[in-house]
Structure formats: C-alpha cells, structure tokens
Image (cartoon, rainbow, N blue to C red):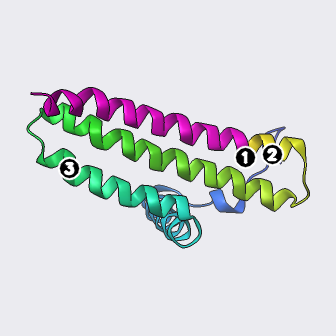
Amino acid sequence: MIDNQQPISEFKSKSGVKRVFAACSYSVQGFKAAWRGEHAFRQELALVVVATVVALSLSITALEKLMLIGVFVLVLIVELLNSAIEAVVDRVSLEHNPLSKNAKDFGSAAVMLTLTLASATWAVIVLPLLVR
C-alpha cells in the first residue's frame, strides 16, 4: 500500500490504449463465459434478437424503436450483473448461508423487475398499434 491508499492490483497496471484493448478483451471473455455458462443469458439474448427485428420493422419513431430495443439490452445488462453476483457468492462459499441466498435472490429480483419494465414498455408502445 502507498500512503494509506487502497492496495494496487496487478490487474490495474495497464493504461492508455493498452487499457482500452484489455478492457475490450475482458468484455469479450465475459460475453463468451455468459454464453457458455448461463442458460438465462442465452434465452434473453435470443429474445433481444427477436425484439430488435420486430422493433425495427414497426412503423414507430426512432426513439420508440430505441426504447423497445434498449429495455431488452437492459435486461441483458442486469442478467450479467446477476450472474456476476452468483459467481462471487459461489466463489466465496458453496455452503448454504442466508446472506448468500439473499444476494442471489436480490439479483434474481433485479432481473425480474427489468423484465417487467421491458414488458410494460412494449405494452405501452406496441399495444396501441395493434388496436388501430
């Protein structure tokens, strides 16, 4: 440690353009790991692909298209964060513990709220098109 600061991590040693390329590489590795190991991520990604095709084919404003696609991208983001929480909890201990359960349940609840938001957004934008 340097002057009561946080310890310096060996993973924080890159700077400048090297850091950008390293960050992109880590992100690709994260996407690959999520694809391989997270069934929910694969399902939600398939949903994003279908939703994107549908949203782009609708006669709505560009902002509405962005909202329809964006809420499902948000679902993917929250799912990745939920998977990260689950991985850390499992890394710490595989023993049953109420705090571990809470952490996993909170992540799951966040995914559910995001899916609810996505559904509501689609209902508000798409349902009026169907009743015309």
Mark 3 and mark 2 in contact? Answer it, CB < 8 Å. no
Q: What residue type is labelled 3?
A: Val
Residue pointed to by mark 2: 101
16 vs 90, nearest the viewer: 90
Q: At numbered mark 2, what does the secondary structure look like: helix, strand or loop?
A: helix
Cα–Cα gap, marks 1 and 3: 32 Å
Q: Residues within 10 Å of mark 1 (few under 14, many from 20)?
A: many
| Residue 127 x/y as whole percent | 23, 31
Q: Is residue 2 something one can see in this rendering?
A: no
In the rendered image, the residue lying farthest to the front is 131
Which of the 4 image quadrants contains residue 72? top left
Q: Would residue 98 be found to the left or right of residue 55 on screen?
A: right
Q: At numbered mark 1, what does the secondary structure look like: helix, strand or loop?
A: helix
**Label located before the other in sequence (3 or 2):** 3
Residue pointed to by mark 3: 54
Cα–Cα gap, marks 3 and 2: 37 Å
Q: Which amino acid does label 1 sit on?
A: Lys
Q: Residues within 10 Å of mark 3 (few under 14, many from 20)?
A: few
Residue pointed to by mark 1: 104
Q: Is the magenta stretch mostly helix, strand or loop?
A: helix
Q: Would residue 103 be found to the left or right of residue 40 on screen?
A: right
Q: Is residue 125 located in the magenta-colored stretch of the structure?
A: yes
